[in-house]
Amino acid sequence: MRNLLFMAIALLFAACDNNNNPFVYQKDAHGRGKTHLYIEESFKPLFTTCIETFMSQYPKARIKGYFDAENKIIEAFYNNKTKTIVITRDFNDQEKAYLKSKNVSYHSDKIATDAIALIMHPGITDTVMSVDQIKALLSNNKEVLPSKAEVKQIVFDQKGSANFNFMTNMLQIEQLADRVAALNSNEEVINYVKTHPNTIGVIGLNWISDQDDPTSLEFMEGLRVAAVYDKDPETAYKPYAGMIYTKEYPLIRDIWIINKGRRSGLNTGFVLFMKKDDKGQLIIQKSGLVPALTPVRLVLQ
């Protein structure tokens, strides 16, 4: 009888998740089960590949990725719609305090460094821009690119996205210019810029960074990518991995994966996959981004 009681207690503890919710039978493990992730849409190409690769290595695992704007993803995490999210930052102090008040236990891991890419219609011949010029174009200022062609539109994927949040926060823009518009996705931005002269698009680099991906190369057809500098035009660089690694390209940001899944569950298994240098980190490097743990080989462009 004593042994049966001990086994019952052990099973009860095994059935609790990281947030001490009891009576949750664990059907998943690091390499099996079903789950879903909420991922910032900027990283859709990368994480589509990562999820497919993970499931090919673990045939008993089924992971579905939901791609949306960063603000909506954080809200989904708050509302327990998902255990794992991928965004461009760790939670701030206010968010951490809120989650602590709800007894939510989670882990945050930086897995890569990414960048914002500014894509241009080929009619814009001057592809060198300063950070101040970008700010002027996004705000109520009539300053234009150094080229003779006036920039009539700047398009984002959507308000509340990581691209939108990064640019407006970094440049401290309080009121957007009338020339600024939002669509619905990074892919829509790419296609829009191709067909609208004098237009600049703000996208996540991941959509065009993988030089071995036919889709990425197709997206780049008929586009120019801006070289950006802070103060000195001689230091203008395009968003290559080497310039992101050295931080010489000014529009860089991180990729964070935040997980409140069980330590032995499938969500955590995927996080560990993304952190391994021979798996997720290698995919990140091959995609043209900068992995957090794997060294980057600098190549002069």
Image (cartoon, rainbow, N blue to C red):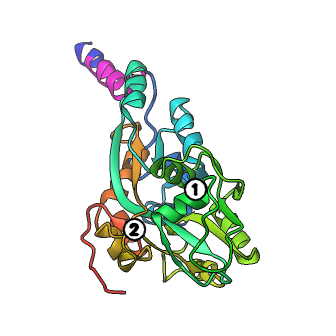
At label 1, which amino acid type do we have? Glu
Q: Is residue 48 above or below residue 159?
A: below
* Image: magenta residue range: 6-21
Q: Give the residue number, with chain letter if any, for mark 1.
A: 41
Q: Secondary structure at mark 2?
A: helix
Query: Which quadrant does the C terminus fall into?
Result: bottom left
Task: Give me the residue at 54% from left, 66% from top.
Answer: 45
Q: Quadrant of residue 106?
A: top left
Q: Secondary structure at mark 1?
A: helix
Give the answer, above or below, for where 151 lies relative to 103: below
Q: Nearer the viewer, mark 1 or mark 2?
A: 1
* Res. 278 visible in picture: no
Point out residue 190 in the picture as x, y percentages from the top left corner: 66, 70
Whichever of callouts 1 and 2 sits on the residue coming sooner in the sequence is 1
Query: Which amino acid does the dot numbered 2 rest on?
Result: Ile
Q: Is residue 246 magenta?
A: no
State the residue at coordinates (43%, 73%).
239
Please give the residue where the numbered disc 2 appears in the rendered image. 284
Residue drawn at point x = 61 percent, y = 84 percent: 125
Relative to 226, say whether 202 is above or below: above
- Single out the residue that lies furthest toward the bottom: 301
Question: What x and y, as percent, mark residue 118?
Answer: 55, 69
Q: Position of residue 244 (x, y in %)?
A: 35, 69
Query: Looking at the rendering, which quadrant does residue 191 occupy?
Result: bottom right
Residue lying farthest top? 1
Label 2: few (<14), some (14–19) or many (≥20) C-alpha neighbours in 10 Å:
many
Can residue 211 be seen here? The reply is: yes
